[in-house]
Amino acid sequence: MSPPRSTIFALSSGRPPVAIAVVRISGPRAGEALRAFTGRLPEPRKAMLARLRDPQSQEIIDEALALWFPGPNSEIGEDTVELQLHGGRAIISAVFAALSRMADFRMAEPGEFTRRAFENGKLDLTRVEGLADLIAADSDAQRRQALRHLQGLLGDKAEAWRKSLIAALALVEAQIDFPDEGDVPQDLTGPALATVCKLRDEIAEALGQGDRGERLRDGMVVAIAGPPNAGKSSLLNRLARREAAIVSPFAGTTRDVIEVHLDLGGYPVVLLDTAGIRASDDPVEQEGIRRAEARAASADLVLWVVDTGNEAANGNTVSWIPGVNSAAASGASRWIVQNKADLAASSINNNPESKSSKYDYNLVNLSAKTGEGIPELVNQLTHFAADFFGSTETALITRGRQRADLADTRAALDRALADTLQGEDDLIAEELRLAARSLGRLTGRVDVEDVLDVIFRDFCIGK
């Protein structure tokens, strides 16, 4: 027999000192810990004001709220206690010290509460990933997408697909194993493959949505590139509304790529400040330029910054800009930003129709020094982000792992439906088992007994 599971505890709120600190305790002896601190258990799911005493010295540690969630009807699926303490370091340390002295108690490992919720069937893997994305969300759009996945947007769909697939596999298995039973219909493989065909089409549709969900989760990448001293770092600071990058009149100040995360109209944007692109003999600057060109080539949008005194910027062509053209290979959109409008009048007006990625060479005038034109650029970037993300919030797939598992499922279903396998029930069943295993990996629920459950529930075999 496996040893009894430890009772774990951890701080579930912000780093002290804080107004209120939440300590979570979960495991088979959680209730015993609460009795040791307060002398009693409150009614389940009702807050109790209590004096917490050190179980060893009986010294009062704090006056706190205590909540008791007996398993399995708790968020984690096992006995759980929450203590809402005054958030001083000494109070938290005293509670942790008292818990550490109890037998079979230990500090929780990172993510262990969520892992136990998964192991106890309270969350599937897609909900776990949704929870992680919700905690990490920087924008409203990311928050909404993560919340939908935490609530089962993909997990419920995958479980429905899995049940349909198991039912189809049960039909094929019954056709193979019990061909002579009088109460088993003669043709079970045909209806099974009809179900499989519909399931394959639904999964293909989900995969056909592209990487919209992943893009929203990761954010749209905007690279600020251009020659030295064009004002790239000043523009980054203006957009970030803080001094994120060092600004200097000396060329080559920026050597490495600087990242700033922005929320533009509820959409996540990763803004990159890159080294000035020029010919250089300095090996460190050369490495910075290499990184700048690589990040510009992989960005979703490149803002190529020049100053208004650059004669080439006053023309109608962008063929002279090597950095912009190198980004074209990756499909990135490219905008030309004429900076230092405070020093000279520009001959190019801001393009008022820069609301879509189809406008590849937008021309924007501004002054990063005075802020002139910055609101217009932010407005254009917000429209661009809205078009870039589109209707991403209902995307079923938000991670590469999910895409890979669904792609494996579709491939197995395609093989099961192949003309070369028709009449080969054993091979069809094997492909359906592989498909069910891939769907099981998606949610973290893989159980071959499900097939037997369906067979013995739906057919009166072995009576």
Image: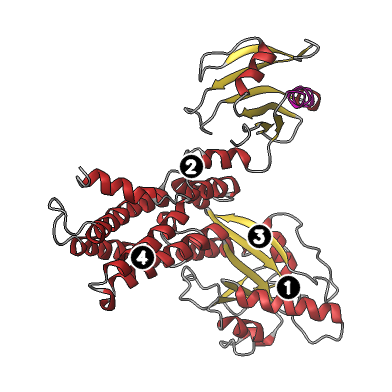
Q: CA distance from mark 1 to mark 2?
A: 59 Å
Range drawn in magenta? 93-102
Mark 4 secondary-structure assignment: helix
Magenta stretch contains residue 400: no
Whether residue 368 is visible here, answered yes or no, is no
x then y, percent, for residue 349: 56, 75
Residue that numbered label 3 is attached to: 239
Mark 2 secondary-structure assignment: loop
Residue that numbered label 1 is attached to: 343
Q: Are marks 1 and 2 in contact (CB under 8 Å)?
A: no
Q: Are marks 3 and 2 in contact (CB under 8 Å)?
A: no
Mark 1 secondary-structure assignment: loop
Q: CA distance from mark 2 to mark 4?
A: 28 Å
Q: Of helix, strand and loop, which mostly describes the magenta segment?
A: helix
Q: CA distance from mark 1 to mark 3?
A: 20 Å
Q: Nearer the viewer, mark 2 or mark 4?
A: 4
Q: Nearer the viewer, mark 1 or mark 4?
A: 4
In the depicted view, which residue is nearer to us: 397 or 121? Answer: 121
What amino acid is at disc 3? Answer: Leu
x then y, percent, for residue 341: 68, 71
Q: Is residue 221 above or below residue 252?
A: above
Q: Residues within 10 Å of mark 4 (few under 14, many from 20)?
A: some
Which of the marked residues, 1 or 3, is nearer the chain's N terminus?
3
Q: CA distance from mark 1 to mark 4?
A: 72 Å
Q: Is residue 209 left or right of residue 241?
A: left
Residue that numbered label 2 is attached to: 123
Residue that numbered label 4 is attached to: 430
The residue drawn where x is 52% and y is 52% is 142
